[in-house]
Image (spheres, grey):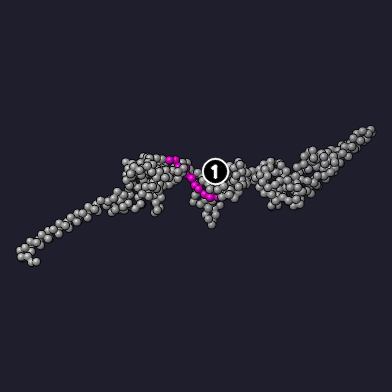
Amino acid sequence: MQFPMHVNKKFAVVLVTVGAAVAIVALLESGHSRGQAPANSPSPQAAANPAQVEPSLDLSPSQLNAIKIAPVGTYEFPVEEEAVGSIDYDEDLSVQVFPDYQGTIIEVLGQLGMEVQKDQPLYTIKSPDLIQAESNLIAAAATYVLTKKELDRVQGLGGVAEREKEQATSDEQTAEGALKAARDAVRVFGKTDAEIDEMIASRKIDPALVVRSPISGKITTKNAQPGWLVQPGNLPAPYSVADVTKKWMLANVMESEIPLFELGQPVQVRVISYPDRVFTGKVSKIYETVDPDTHRVTIRSEIADPNDELHPGMLANFVIRVRGPVESTALPANGVVRESDGTMTAWVTTDRHHFVQRVVKTGLRKDNEVQILEGLQRGELAVTDGAVFLSNLLEAPPSD
């Protein structure tokens, strides 16, 4: 169909006007849709600067029941260092029981793990030195008896020269001194006066030298066997006895941490065998030598173990309190979330309905409390339990 020329021009003007109007409406609708972001999306200004984005959520009443909210408070965090080490006997309370003289073991009296008292016999040896000392004792006793009889005889006679009496008296006194010295020599081997008197009376030597425990404690090693030749200080020792009510704990720490440690600092120890138990002690020695390969130094602590529950060689976790407690902003552990990118976050609110996710910097942890170094202020309302629930809501895809 064809229209007159003047009609075609008017129709074209109408078409252009209508097209322009449609374009304006479409542009307005497009701009309007971009300006309306969902509740959990950042504003256009925040999108332009991602570093300032703080995601947020609005919770329904039922969702609020899944969390707890409280003002951000403070907590006293102890300043502690942790290390891994091992348990050992207290070497200052452990002795190797050697005989004082060479000899052959006659009888073994102590068994491994036995509790012993100080001066309790552990083993006996046949000692040539003891045999010689006892032989001298019996001979000295016999000589004393003879010289005493001679003195009594001379003193009972009349007309004996004074010089003869003096000689008899001198011989008797010399023999008496020799007998006392012989008794002392045998007493050194541990023989009692009653045993010495019995040897003199019977004129029989007792070759058994009794070796006794020098301390009260537990037998921790036993090498003694009948017939074994033992000598003073010749390893291995026949027995070792230790006071097991105290143990050593040896931990290796980095050389850069040495300035943190001091003698007397309190120590807490945990071992796998008793996961719910805490053993206490204090730092007793900081070794001078640094291992050139690992650049670590050994820290020794004395640990109370009255029931002998810690055994040498046990692996242990050590916590050493190096300074006094620090009061700091804190949040319960259930209020802090480690996100997939490694950042730590918490959730804050001002009206208990709208919640904002905040990136925080954490520090020490103790008794379910987390130190907050940056990101929260004391008194702010924060989620103290259920923070993971909110983070999961934020990451959940929107429902249709």
What amino acid does circle 1 point to?
Answer: Arg
Left or right of residue 236: residue 77: left
Q: Which image quarter is the N terminus in?
A: bottom left
- For this orientation, the residue located farthest to the front is 1
Residue found 44% across the figure and 40% down from its top: 76
Quarter of the view holding residue 244:
top right
Q: Position of residue 84 (x, y in %)?
A: 53, 50
Q: Bounds of the magenta span? A: 75-85
Residue found 77% across the figure and 39% down from its top: 192
Front-most of residues 164 and 128: 128
Residue found 33% across the figure and 49% down from its top: 55
Q: Is residue 83 magenta?
A: yes
- For this orientation, the residue located farthest to the bottom is 2
Left or right of residue 59: residue 309: right
- For this orientation, the residue located farthest to the right is 159
Q: Position of residue 235 (x, y in %)?
A: 69, 52
Q: Is residue 276 magenta?
A: no
Q: Position of residue 83 (x, y in %)?
A: 52, 49
Front-most of residues 337 and 284: 337
Left or right of residue 173: residue 31: left
The majority secondary structure of the magenta stretch comes to strand
Q: Secondary structure at mark 1?
A: strand
Q: Is residue 3 visible?
A: yes
Residue that label 1 marks: 277
Residue found 72% across the figure and 50% down from its top: 224
Left or right of residue 85: residue 11: left
Q: Position of residue 93 (x, y in %)?
A: 63, 44
Circle 1 packing at 10 Å, graded few (<14), some (14-19), many (20+), is: few
